[in-house]
Image: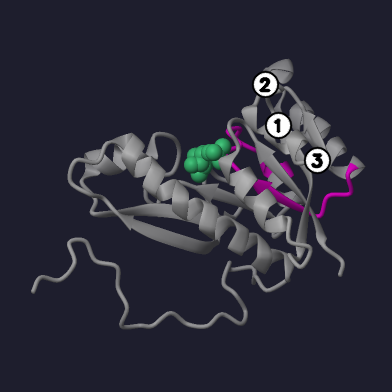
Amino acid sequence: MNRARTAVLISGRGSNMAALLDAAADPAFPAAISLVLSNRADAAGLERARAAGVATAAVESRGFRGDRAGFEAAMQAVLEEHAIELVLLAGFLRVLTEGFVRRWQGRMLNIHPSLLPAFPGLDTHERALAAGVRLHGCTVHLVSPGLDEGPILAQAAVPVLPGDDADSLAARVLQQEHRIYPAALRWLAEGRVGPDGRLRDAPCPDPAAALRNPPDGP
Ligand code: GAR
């Protein structure tokens, strides 16, 4: 089987990267994680990737202050060196230029800790709590120019519980991130994702099913 050569881009601890590595450890998984690339040489996730025997690289964004095109050209060179076909942003905290996004359009995914289009940007859990939403969650989307924008591929919702703080809510959402990101990579690598983000051959969810919080009473 020809497995899609995939790069995971990180800036920090890399728990989503680790979930992707775990999924791709199965030789039957249609994508191989061929590179973990970070914009910070001290990202904890790099160590974890090395320990798993995966090639790593760092292109320090700090070295390119005010020169986003130069930073992205350096990243593109590394991606080409490793013959990368798919790019997964996993806690990669740099805004990408339209040129870079267009180059990878249809082949680049992002995971975001909210039910987009609600709460793009940072501090999503704090903002969800402040807004008083009863359901929160995470989204995997194809990357378009624009912050946390692009056709949605997968979402998972979790309840916001009484007594939640940003940390407890983040932990509940993160569990779902680790579930839906490998699934989305599988679908993309299998060529099943249309330009609108929908699976061409998806089984439809039960139209009567709903996630409710609070659930129905007796
Ligand atoms: C994740 O929650 C991811 O959804 C978020 O950063 C965290 C990275 O954690 N991404 C964004 O906020 C992108 N807008 P991880 O390094 O443990 O995967």
Q: Is residue 93 above or below residue 173?
A: above
Q: Is residue 25 above or below residue 165?
A: below
Do the residues bearing badges 1 and 2 touch, measured as CB atoms within 8 Å?
yes
**Magenta region includes residue 199:** no
Mark found first going from the N terminus, 3 or 2: 2
Question: Which mark lies nearer to you, 3 or 2?
Answer: 3
Q: Could you tell me residue 68's position as x and y percent?
A: 70, 28
**The C terminus - image quarter:** bottom left
The amino acid type, in three-letter code, at marker 2 is Asp
Q: Residue at x 65, y 26 (%)?
A: 43
Residue 93 visible in the shown view? yes
The amino acid type, in three-letter code, at marker 1 is Leu
- Give the residue pinned by disc 3: 53
- Give the residue pinned by disc 1: 46
Mark 2 residue element: loop
Neighbour class for label 2 at 10 Å: few (<14), some, many (≥20)? some
Q: Could you tell me residue 75's position as x and y percent?
A: 79, 34
Q: Is residue 76 above or below residue 157?
A: above
**Magenta region includes residue 84:** yes
Residue 191 sits in quarter: bottom right
The amino acid type, in three-letter code, at marker 3 is Gly
Q: Residue at x 63, y 44 (%)?
A: 18
**Looking at the image, which residue sits at the far left?**
218
> In this rendering, would 80 be left or right of 59?
right
Mark 3 residue element: loop
Neighbour class for label 1 at 10 Å: few (<14), some, many (≥20)? many
Question: Which mark lies nearer to you, 3 or 1?
Answer: 3
Magenta-drawn segment: 82-100
Neighbour class for label 3 at 10 Å: few (<14), some, many (≥20)? few
